[in-house]
Structure formats: structure tokens, C-alpha cells
Image (cartoon, helix red, strand yellow):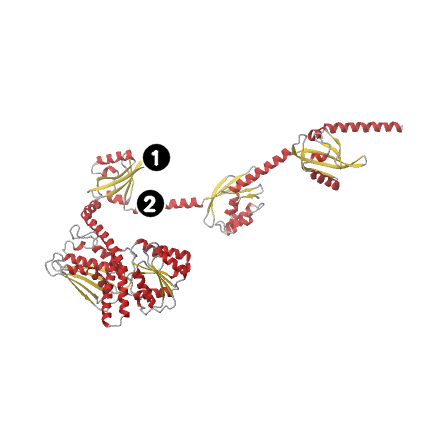
Amino acid sequence: MQQADGKKAEAAERDAMVLMQLVLDACPVPTRMSTIAGETLYRNPASKALYGDRTLIDDYYVEPEDRQALVGVLLEKGCIDDFRVRQYDANDNIFWGSISARLIDFQGRSVIVSNATNITDMIVAQDQTRQANERLADGIESLAEGFALYDKDDRLVLANSQYRKMHSVSADVLVPGVNWFDFLRVTAQRNQFPISRDRIDDWLVERAKDRREFRQQEFQHSDGGWFFVSNCPTREGGFVVTRIDITERKRAELAAKEADELLRRVLEACPASIQMTRVDDGRVLYRSPASQELLGDVERAFDSYINPLHRKQFVERLLREGAVDDFETQLKRKDGQPCWCSISAKLIDFHGEQVIVSHTYDLSDRIEMQQQLERQRETLHQNEKLSALGGLLAGVAHELNNPLSVVLGMSLTLKETASDTKTIERADKISKAAERCARIVKTFLAMARQQPTRTSNVAIDDIVTAATEVVGYSIKSSDIKLALELESDLPAIWADPDQLSQVLINLLVNAEHALHDWDGQRQITVSTCRHAESGNIVVKVADSGPGVSEEILPRIFEPFFTTKEVGAGTGIGLSFCHRIVQSHQGTIRVETTEGGGSTFVVSLPASDQVPDRAETDASEPSRSTGRFCLVVDDEKDVGELIAEILTRDGFTVFIARSGKEAVAQLKQRPFDVILSDLRMPDMDGRRLYNHVSDYHPAEVGRLAFLTGDTISPDAQVFLRATKRPYLEKPVKPFELRMFVSKLVDRGG
């Protein structure tokens, strides 16, 4: 009986083994049994199909140490699941395998039972999904708009940097997982939005409506920024928020609105006559107040034309060309009187129809002006010639500066150093004559140059003297007596001496012209005094000529008005004088009687300005023993004169005849003072300044200019740009010493 039972058990075991063999052979999952050393004890057909004829397990692995790691885990834990390694298939292709294994006891020894799954497609799909997610994240991050995604529980999933930037005030709480309402409450509490604290809850209730339906709104932040916000629900029950900064658009809209309002106001206030009319029937759609004032309140454009045919020609030309400029015709004024007008117009589209926008200009004043300009054409031509002559004269005057500097400097030096009386008297005469020439030259230059007004306390006698020195010879050579009656000890006036000198020169020249063909007494008298009541300083230029007729007296100060024949005057003298005197808070008028001469009276207020220290401080400059000075001037005599004057003040002076020589001197030693001319050959003063700035920056503050070239615009621009002090030639020794002393005192 027992033997029979044993036989049955053996048969059942054999059947079970056969069944297991059939199951394993039919299993589609590669399954094998191997020793720990790697010897294969069993493998099913699926394993053979995957790995081929390899018998050693190590041959399956791309990296053999991966199997060692798997065995180590099995020995430690007894099992392993989803161990991912790279392996070779039957065709030696590498694939990703997922291995699950168990350590079991078989016939008295430990063996490994494992199965493998080819998960290459899954790995590739996961990589593709990850890359797609990364691309999506990069795309969201690169958006110019702010982007945020919230889940069905109103919690933040992700937000790009633009969204955080737009919520910079509350960006610290904008982290994944934060509730949308909690975040909005923080923004309101931190005053990101213009909401009062007692309305925050109501505001949140209103915002709750935004998130579950598509909605677009505009919001303004407390800092003035505007944002266009879109809310869009997602399929999972969450929502997406996008924000666009529309601050510039809002500003543009506001600017456009303001521009429209401004245009309306401009049109209402514009003195130009502007109309909008229909093409076909001429009905007026809009007229500016100026148009109504000119043409009256007419309903149709036809009614304004003296000759209706002209309106037809005007419209035909406009339709053909699209625009018309300066179409001249006669129109009816508001009072019914005819007047010549110029019409410029364009066709525009307005509410789907073509209309005419036109500007009408009353030509009455222009016609009168053209007639007047015809009379003044020759006068203006003469003015151009005089301007050219003035420029030439200024150039000649500039060329006189260098020799005048030598004559003036040497005569004053001789006067200071001579011991005998006769020599001193002769030197004094030379210096006075040179100073007179220098004053005339400076007056010419002041008349020729164009520069901003430079006011200071000046004596009226000095201005009269400068003017008479310029035109005195011409007056006397015309057999006209010139008399000066100057009151002594008059207060100074606050004025630009150059401009007032030009006023007096103009008045003296006019007086001389008035006496050219006069047979009676020929005398010009210049007098100064102080008005007893107003305290003003009064200058009178009187001539004994024929006087000014009553017909032209009211127009004598008008621009371009002249009594001289064509080619004999500029037509700008008296209007120019009037403008300058008015800018000095003064007045100018004329007193005249026919046959009894004319007197031009200029009244200027006495100065209430405190004199600058530079104006009153006439103390002798201190000696500069032990200091080094570099004089740069291409005129040998001028350079030696400056050197002689400064040497007597204790300077050690070096002379350079050009900018290049000055550069060589600067390489050898530092200088306490550098005095340079502007206009020189090879390297001029401008290039020397640039060299000192680049290579000797410590000595830029010690550089100044002695020049007679301040008349040219480029010289004026250069001197203003560098802000370096300068002294105009011709130079007096005392002026030079004071100039250098101030330069040294400023730390030069």
C-alpha cells in the first residue's frame, strides 16, 4: 500500500514538473535560473529569443559590474524588483532591461530565478515625455506674458518669471502649493492693488468669479502700471492666468486722448482759418473760429467765392491730384468785402466719404509785405555786402592783435623801466596810441563777433570814447565837427559794453550821413548827464542837420525802414539800437525839428549791482619766484614780450614756438603755468590742450590761452567746452600779471 502511494506521488511530481515546464516554455516573459556564479541552469524560449545562445549571465550585461550589484542586493535582501540595466540582445544590440529576481534553494544550493523585460520603448517614451515637459516649461518661461497654472483646489502648480516679476511686491509667497485666495489677499494687504483694507474681502469675492470661466480684464497696480489679465479654466477643473503689461499702451491711449483734446483746443484757439467741407455740395462740416471770423457763418463753401467757377476748378484739381497748395482766389469776407486768399487743402476719408480739409490764408498782409519787401530788396543786398565787409574788417583787426601786443607791451615796459623823463614821456605817448588802437580793434571785434550778452558795471564815458574812436576819423574827414560834453563822476551802468558801443556807433554814423549834403552848420555833439528825477544816465547824440520829417518820424524805429536811397544804408540801424536799449531796461527816442537837427536820447538806469572783486581789486599781483612758466606762441616777438613780463615777476620762463615744441618741453619738466596761443602752425592750441589732457592731466588746470582768435565760432565753442581761462590780445603787462596771478591762485 505504501509502495503504491509512493508511486502515485512520484507520478504526480513528474506531472507537475512537466506542467511547470510547459508553463515556463509558453511564458512570453524571458525567465531563467542561474547559479550565483552565473552558470545558466534553465532558460525558457523567450529568454533564448531575447539573449540568443549566450550561456554565461555576465555576457548579457553591457557593464558587468551591474550584475555584481544585482547579486549583491539578492544576497543581502533575497529579492529585487525592476533592476534597470543595459544588456545585449541576441543580435548584440543594446537595450534597456528591467530585471526582477529571487534567491531560492534548489537541490541544496542557492540559485537565482529571474525574469527580464525589454523596457527600451518605455525609457524612450519617458525621455520624450521629460523633454516635452522641459520644452513646455522653457516655452512658458520664455513668454513675454506672465503665466500661472492653478489646480482644481486653487493651488499654484507653476508660474513663470514674468508672472513673478509682475507680482514683485508679493513674489516671496508665490510658491507652488500656495492658495490663490491667500496669495491675492497678500497682494491686497501689501498695496499691490489700489484697494482699501476694509474692502479686501469684498474684492476677493469679486475675484472668485474670475477663475472658473473665461474672462479678460484690465487691472491697475498702485504704482500706476496697467495689466491685461486673462483667466481660462482647464479640463481638470483648475485655471490658467496670463498677464500682459499694457502700461505703455495705456499711456499711449491717454496720450492719444490728451492729443485729441489738445487738437480740439488748438483748433479752437488756432488763428489759422481751417474748414472741413463736402466735395459734392460744399456743405461746411467744421469751421474753426478763425474761419468763421474771416468768412462768416456760411453753410456752403460756394457762398464764399467771388467767382463760383474758381471753386469748381479748385475741386477738380483736388480730385485729380489729392492735394492743392496755395490756390489763390478772391473770397468774401464776413462783412461781404472781397479779399485775395490762398487755399491749401487735402482730400481725406471721413466716415466713409471723401471730404476736403482746407486752410485759408488771407493774403492782404502778404501782398502788402511783398510790396514792402520789394522796396527793401536792394537794402538787404547792401546789408549783405556790409556784413561781408564787417567780417573782412574783423579778420584784419585780428591780424593786428599780435603786433599791437608787442607795441603796447614794450611801450608800457619801457615806461616802467626807463629812468629819464624824456624816454618816459615818449613811451607814454606810444602806449597811449597803442591802447587807442587796441580799443578800436576790440570794438571792431565786438561788432563782428556774435556772442551772448556779457553784462558788467561799465562807465558810460568809456563806451562813448570807444565809439568815437571808431568813427571819429570818418566824421572829422567829412568836415564835420565832433564835440564831447561828458559829465564827470557819473555812476556806472549795468550793461554789455560791446552792444552799447554798437548803438552809439550806429547813431554817430546816422548823424554823419544826415550832414553829408547839409549846407548849414555841420556839427555832431555827444553829451552825457544824469537825469535829475529818475536818476538814469542819459546819452544824447545831436546833429545840426535837416532833422526828421513828420511823415517818417512814427516809423523811424521800425525794422527795415530807411530814409536813405537804395544802396546807401542798411535799414537795420535804429531798430537794432531800439532792441538793444530795451534789453538794457532803457529807452531811446528822437527829438527833431525840420531844419533844426535831430537829437537821439538814450536813457539807461544806473547800476545797482555790487562790483565784482575782480573789478575793484587793482592791487599789484604777488611775485612768483621759483615757479616755471611755459609760453607757447608762434610769434617770436609776442612770446619774448610775455616771457620778459613774467620773468620780472619772478617766473622762470620757457618759450615754445609751436605746439610740438611745447610737447617736447612738457616731457622734460612740469610747469606751474602754461600760456598758449590758439592759432599756430603744426600743432595749434586745441591739439595741445588734448595732448596735455591725455598725457599730462595734472597740468590741465595750469593751462590758459592768450589769443586774438576769439571771433571765430569754432574758437568760441572750444573755449566754452574746455572752460579754460583766456585773455584776448593785445595784452597789457598789468592785465597779463593779474591773469597769471589768478591762474596760480586757483591752483594752476
Q: Which quarter of the figure has residue 655?
A: bottom left
At a point 81% along the width and 34% down the height, the residue shown is: 107
Q: Position of residue 301 (x, y in %)?
A: 25, 38
Q: Nearer the viewer, residue 339 or 610?
A: 610
Measure how far apart labels 2 and 1 are at the Cα level.
22 Å
Q: Locate residue 233, reporting x and y percent.
A: 54, 39
Crowding near pointer 1: few (<14 within 10 Å), some, many (20+)? few
In the rendered structure, the answer to whether residue 144 lies left or right of residue 516 reads right
Q: Secondary structure at mark 2?
A: helix
Name the image quarter holding residue 531.
bottom left
- In this rendering, would 694 be left or right of 207? left
Residue 241 placement (x, y as % from top left) = 52, 42
Question: Is residue 740 rendered to the left or right of residue 547?
Answer: right
> Vertically, is 620 above or below 476?
below
- Kind of residue sitting beneath label 2: Arg
Which dot marks residue 518? none
Q: Which residue is mark 1?
A: 352
* Near-viewer residue (498 or 493): 498
In the image, residue 255 sits, relative to residue 590, either above or below, namely above
- Labels 2 and 1: the sequence-earlier one: 2
Q: Residue furthest left?
A: 519
What secondary structure is marked by label 1? loop
Find disc 2 in the rendering and name its residue: 264
Q: Amino acid at mark 1?
A: Gly
| Res 454 seen here | yes
Please say whether residue 212 is visible from this viewpoint: no
Q: Nearer the viewer, residue 689 or 496?
A: 689
